[in-house]
Image (cartoon, rainbow, N blue to C red):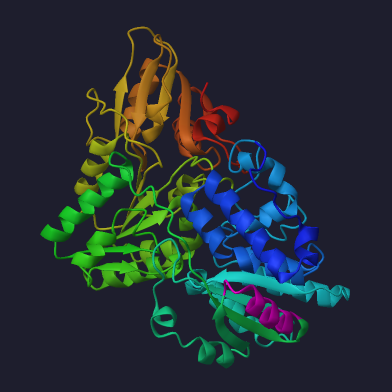
């Protein structure tokens, strides 16, 4: 599809007058709004830094100079300017551009940023490397006020303050992460004292939509030495939000959490800046002392849960699968080591689709299976999810329940929803398909082959596995998780350990990072679905 309006090129941006630059900005704004590419929230974030993007590419000699976008939600205008306008209608689609910066896609994408809070660490490393090699480059990272709540960003600020590097941090202050930004810096706004205490020179806030001010202030700072912060105030347009679907796994969890907050005074709820996507914002308004938004800080969220549990409460932590990886040390050392009764809702488990490699929920089964004392579930539908949550409320140790990003399937009437597994074996001894939880929605065996569905991954339903080996010795394991460390490997270990004469085949997410596309397309590419 050809652009409805002429879009400025990078050369145009670098040579245009300010008046022409304003016209170019308006052309880009109208182009993006008319097409509404990708996620609404990502489009809003990108429009919020439209003027900033133009000015940075005008001041910097990219790609020789380094420009990193944290978390990457802000990069749509950057992608339009850097050679991807002709493929922009394929954004986040199979074979099209990624929704995040990706160095394999363009030399202008200096660093892959799909998780927030990573840009400053990368910028410090790249600047230190340039000093070692003697390479003259300038280094700029655009970091949102939400990303600044993360521990890694704080660690990088502290370290950089003593290294004598020349860096510019553009603090994009729009008072949003996924939800409104939380924490004391946002609440009290004492940015200047904070940055100065860490040996960063601070300037701002300035209007992030005023091209003239941006060019003057940023131009001055990129020419100066030392660690420098330019604090800009921007407005993210509100173009609408898909909200939480009425019939998906997350909505079942939200209803359960709401009901349990009313009946169980021990119950507390924690989310690292994801209350909105989980449908939990209303619960924070009704229970402000028992519902916590920890900010984009998964490590702190899990450590906070450990402290609450150690004090006698029953915390439930809502984590996206891909972001749960960041809290692995706290899962092990703070929660599991002390056998604390923390419930984890692992959202967006499995192939999530268009957000791509940084957001696929591939690794949670392997990670959680490693942790001693952890109980791990994958329900087949909403009724099973609620039954599992209720049945594990008084468990003395930690429990994790993984759910996909998908609509609820029709309830499986044939399945006892409160059991770890159910089984249907045809009279003849054919192949047995063992399907992990929610994969039942799309992984169905041929009519002449058997079906067993495992909902509790750890501990394994060993009695059932023994029974199944008496009925069939040809097994196919299908799971929406990485094959390495997944259910298939767990079953293979059990079969080998017991000496069962079973031939085992596994279909799961292969040993590579999976790019963006629809979940159905990606499952076919991975050989998980025909």
Q: Is residue 271 left or right of residue 45?
A: left
Spot the residue most to the left: 263
The region drawn magenta spans: 208-222
**Which residue is at 63% across, 69% downward?**
52
Q: Note whether 415 is above or below 45 in the view shown.
A: above
- Magenta residues, dominant SS class: helix
**Which residue is at 36% across, 54% downward?**
373
Spot the residue most to the right: 134
- How many numbered discs, if any? 0
Q: Which of 21 and 112 lies nearest the eye of the viewer?
A: 21
Q: Note whether 38 is above or below 238 in the view shown.
A: above
Which image quarter: residue 412? top left
Q: Note whether 511 is above or below 474 in the view shown.
A: below
* Residue 205 position within the rendered picture, expressed as x and y whole percent measured from the top left: 54, 83
Q: Is residue 139 visible?
A: yes
**Which residue is at 47% across, 73% downward?**
149
* Residue 530 position within the rendered picture, expressed as x and y whole percent measured from the top left: 52, 21
* Residue 483 position within the rendered picture, expressed as x and y whole percent measured from the top left: 54, 37
Q: Is residue 102 visible?
A: no
Q: Note whether 54 is above or below 459 in the view shown.
A: below
> Quadrant where the N terminus lies?
top right
* Residue 362 position within the rendered picture, expressed as x and y whole percent measured from the top left: 51, 44
**Which residue is at 58% across, 31% downward?**
526
Residue 217 counted in the magenta span? yes
Spot the residue most to the front: 19
Q: Which of 261 and 375 lies nearest the eye of the viewer?
A: 261
Residue 302 counted in the magenta span? no
Q: Which of 151 and 286 lies nearest the eye of the viewer?
A: 286
């Amino acid at each position: 599809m050809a652009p409805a309006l002429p879009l400025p090129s990078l050369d145009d941006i670098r040579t245009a007058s300010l008046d022409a630059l304003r016209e170019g900005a308006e052309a880009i704004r109208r182009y993006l709004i008319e097409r509404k590419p990708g996620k609404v929230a990502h489009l809003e974030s990108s429009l919020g830094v439209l003027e900033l993007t133009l000015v940075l590419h005008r001041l910097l000699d990219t790609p020789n100079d380094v420009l990193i976008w944290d978390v990457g939600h802000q990069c749509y205008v950057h992608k339009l300017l850097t050679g991807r306008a002709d493929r922009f209608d394929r954004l986040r689609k199979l074979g099209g551009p990624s929704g995040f910066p990706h160095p394999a896609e363009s030399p202008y994408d200096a660093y892959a940023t799909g998780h927030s809070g990573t840009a400053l660490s990368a910028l410090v490393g790249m600047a230190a490397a340039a000093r070692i090699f003697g390479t003259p480059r300038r280094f700029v990272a655009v970091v949102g006020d939400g990303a600044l709540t993360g521990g890694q960003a704080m660690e990088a600020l502290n370290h950089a303050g003593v290294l004598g590097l020349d860096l510019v941090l553009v603090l994009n202050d729009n008072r949003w992460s996924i939800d409104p930004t939380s924490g004391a810096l946002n609440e009290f706004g004492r940015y200047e004292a904070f940055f100065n205490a860490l040996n960063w020179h601070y300037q701002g806030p300035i209007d992030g939509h005023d091209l003239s001010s941006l060019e003057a202030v940023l131009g001055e700072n990129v020419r100066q030495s030392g660690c420098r912060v330019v604090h800009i105030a921007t407005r993210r347009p509100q173009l609408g939000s898909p909200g939480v679907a009425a019939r998906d796994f997350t909505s079942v969890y939200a209803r359960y959490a709401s009901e349990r907050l009313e009946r169980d005074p021990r119950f507390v709820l924690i989310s690292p800046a994801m209350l909105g996507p989980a449908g939990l914002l209303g619960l924070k308004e009704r229970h402000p002392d028992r519902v916590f938004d920890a900010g984009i800080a998964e490590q702190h969220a899990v450590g906070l849960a450990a402290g609450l549990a150690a004090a006698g409460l029953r915390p439930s932590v809502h984590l996206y699968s891909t972001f749960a990886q960041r809290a692995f040390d706290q899962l092990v050392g703070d929660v599991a080591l002390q056998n604390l009764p923390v419930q984890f809702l692992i959202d967006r488990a499995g192939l999530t689709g268009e957000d791509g490699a940084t957001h696929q929920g591939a690794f949670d089964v392997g990670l959680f299976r490693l942790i001693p004392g952890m109980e791990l579930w994958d329900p087949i539908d909403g009724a099973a999810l609620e039954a599992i949550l209720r049945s594990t409320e008084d468990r003395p140790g930690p429990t994790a329940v993984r759910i996909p990003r998908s609509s609820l399937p029709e309830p499986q009437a044939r399945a006892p929803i409160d059991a770890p597994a159910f089984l249907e074996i045809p009279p003849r001894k054919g192949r047995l398909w063992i399907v992990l939880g929610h994969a039942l929605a799309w992984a169905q065996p041929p009519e002449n082959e058997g079906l067993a569905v495992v909902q509790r991954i750890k501990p394994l339903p060993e009695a059932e596995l023994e029974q199944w080996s008496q009925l069939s010795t040809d097994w196919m394991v299908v799971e929406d998780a990485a094959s390495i460390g997944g259910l298939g490997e767990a079953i293979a270990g059990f079969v080998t350990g017991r000496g069962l004469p079973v031939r085992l085949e596994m279909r799961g997410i292969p040993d590579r990072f999976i790019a963006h596309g629809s979940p159905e397309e990606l499952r076919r590419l991975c050989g998980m679905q025909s």
